[in-house]
């Protein structure tokens, strides 16, 4: 029983660490609203881990990731008067302690890539820290992390405030 409690305590500590990092991501601001791109990118990755598409902590940018990003954007953001759907900026600008980009040799100073091909030229892979990836394997922690991201960056951001409420 103590082994389970020890594991649960460790998982909780990891959750607290990443909840803090994720809830304090730097985001651009437009019209008083935080840009949702990094949040949508993280929700996309959470979904792909849950679906088994991302099955280890290193992955490359793919058409599946881009399609899922668009799907998650439509679900949570829809048509925004402030922001356009754009996966390239969060891939490039997300904090390294949340998702680490391993650059290919000679590409360390490359500008923000704007295509799958260019991303894969610049980045050898994107890496989810092993402790965060471990956390994302657990349904409960994945679900709570997802809700926290939605709450901080989407629900309380009023992005959909221009849409009529029925």
Image (cartoon, rainbow, N blue to C red):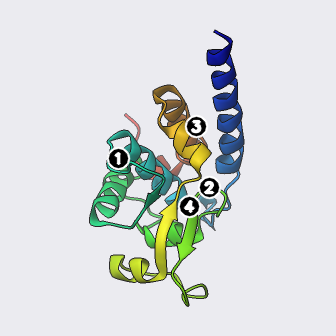
> What residue is drawn where x is 28% and y is 59%?
64
Which of labels 3 and 4 is toward the front? 3
Residue drawn at x 66%, y 44% as measured from the top left? 18
Q: Nearer the viewer, mark 2 or mark 1?
A: 2
Label 1, secondary structure: give it.
helix
Tell me the residue that label 1 is attached to.
75
Q: Any mark on residue 146, and which? A: none
What residue is disc 4 on? Answer: 35
Q: CA distance from mark 3 to mark 4?
A: 16 Å
CA distance for labels 2 and 3:
15 Å
Question: x and y percent of residue 76 in the render?
Answer: 41, 47
Q: Which residue is mark 3?
A: 148
Secondary structure beneath label 3: helix
Look at the image and tell me in which quarter the N terminus lies: top right
Residue 98's label in the rendered image is 2
**Mark 4 neighbour class, 10 Å CA radius: few under 14, some 14 to 19, many 20 or more:** many
Residue beneath the point at 64% across and 49% down: 22
Q: Secondary structure at mark 2?
A: loop
Q: Give the distance between the C-alpha atoms of the residues marked 2 and 1, in whole angstroms.
A: 23 Å
Residue 141, x across and y down, in percent: 54, 31
Please tell me whether residue 117 is drawn above or below residue 38 in the rendered image. Answer: below
Frontmost residue, 79 versus 133: 133
Dot 1, crowdedness within 10 Å: few (<14), some or many (≥20)?
A: few
Graded by Cα atoms within 10 Å as few (under 14), some (14 to 19) or many (20 or more), the crowding at tag 2 reads some
């Amino acid at each position: 029983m103590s082994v389970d409690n020890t594991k649960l305590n460790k998982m909780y500590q990891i959750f607290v660490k990443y909840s803090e990092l994720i809830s304090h991501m730097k985001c651009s601001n437009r019209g008083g609203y935080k840009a949702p791109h990094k949040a949508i990118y993280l929700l996309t990755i959470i979904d792909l881990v849950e679906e088994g598409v991302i099955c280890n902590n290193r992955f490359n940018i793919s058409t599946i990731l881009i399609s899922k990003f668009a799907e998650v954007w439509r679900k949570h953001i829809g048509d925004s008067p402030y922001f356009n759907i754009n996966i390239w900026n969060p891939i490039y600008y997300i904090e390294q302690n949340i998702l680490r980009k391993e650059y290919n040799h000679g590409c360390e100073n490359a500008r923000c890539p704007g295509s799958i091909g260019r991303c894969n030229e610049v980045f050898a892979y994107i890496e989810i820290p092993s402790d965060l990836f471990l956390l994302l394997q657990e349904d409960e922690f994945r679900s709570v992390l997802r809700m926290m991201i939605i709450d901080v960056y989407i629900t309380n951001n009023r992005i959909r405030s221009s849409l009529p409420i029925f």
